[in-house]
Image (cartoon, rainbow, N blue to C red):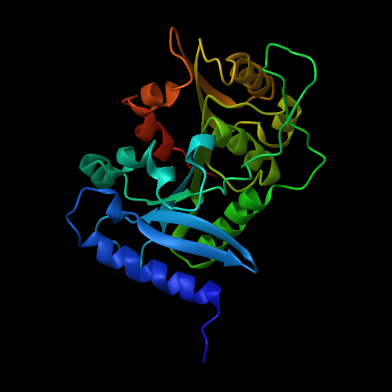
Amino acid sequence: MKIPHRFSLLLLLTISLISEGQSQNRDFNLYEQQLFIQGTDTLPCRILSPINFSINTKYPLVVFLHGSGERGIDNEAQLTWGGSLFLDSANRVNYPAIIVFPQCHTDSSWSVVSRKPVADSLGNFFFPMDKPATKPLQMVMDFIDTLVTSGRVDPKRIYIGGLSMGGFGTYEILWRRPKLFAAAIAICGGGNPESVKIYGKKFPIWVFHGTLDPSVPVANSRLMVNALQGEGAMVKYTEYPDVYHNSWTNAFAEPELLKWLFSQKKK
């Protein structure tokens, strides 16, 4: 009898979590390779399990969305930025969680974004809210639902984060699934400030940006932070002077980043 993919995926995940919890290696091979398949569409994912994984425990879930430079189908490039942070032995001991790095296909994006014909301080970025989610983002949302259904995830401690294109996706997934996440991290991203009305009230989010970012102007984060504050979000904003687009390097080095993230829990 052929096992439906949805259930075989959960079985593989459980096996990988147990085996990885017993491993002592400190490299990206600890991120189990998985493929989330829906019809003809495939979402490559890398999954890191908690040390000493127990099937009787519900764990926090962190989903991190990479930038445009890490798109592809190799199921590896998405770990370039941020992958090492969650592999740190102290972090794995102090913050046991299931970590997921999905990978967006080369010809797509995590968000619905267009460019205005007239230059502006936002870099011409525009984020319409009247279109369906891109296929990769929709599959991320469906994959999260699958993981929650598996019974291994604490539904009150699901976190989303992303950088650059992944920062765009972070802001978008928040308004598309406003009741799903306990907190978010948005690094050098941007979004539609009108969307904050859907999820912003009392929502914990930490925003990062480099002042000299030429790819995604810092005005994007400033705009979203102002909108978040206006809606009563619990927003933290860290802007790095003299830092360009790679502000994720500074963000990942913040000593309080994971402590802050994992302290957030939905009521």
Q: To which quarter of the image does residue 252 belong?
A: top left
Q: Please identify the residue farthest to the right as the structure is shown.
A: 130
186 relative to 20, above or below: above
186 relative to 3, above or below: above
Residue 1: x and y in percent read 51, 92
Tell me which residue sits at (71%, 39%) in the image.
Answer: 112
* Visible residue check, residue 54: no
Does residue 167 appear to the left or right of 28 in the view shown? right
* Visible residue check, residue 217: yes
Tell me which residue sits at (49%, 39%) in the image.
Answer: 66
Q: To which quarter of the image does residue 22 belong?
A: bottom left
The number of numbered discs placed on residues in the rendered structure image is 0
Tell me which residue sits at (44%, 7%) in the image.
Answer: 241
Quarter of the rendering occupied by the C terminus = top right
Q: Please identify the residue farthest to the top as the structure is shown.
A: 242
Does residue 18 appear to the left or right of 187 in the view shown? left
Residue 91: x and y in percent read 27, 41
Residue closer to the observer: 116 or 167: 116
Residue 35: x and y in percent read 49, 63
63 relative to 216, above or below: below
Residue closer to the observer: 166 or 222: 166
Does residue 57 appear to the left or right of 62 in the view shown? left
Q: Please identify the residue farthest to the left as the structure is shown.
A: 24
1 relative to 66, above or below: below
Tell me which residue sits at (57%, 27%) in the image.
Answer: 189
Residue 223: x and y in percent read 66, 17
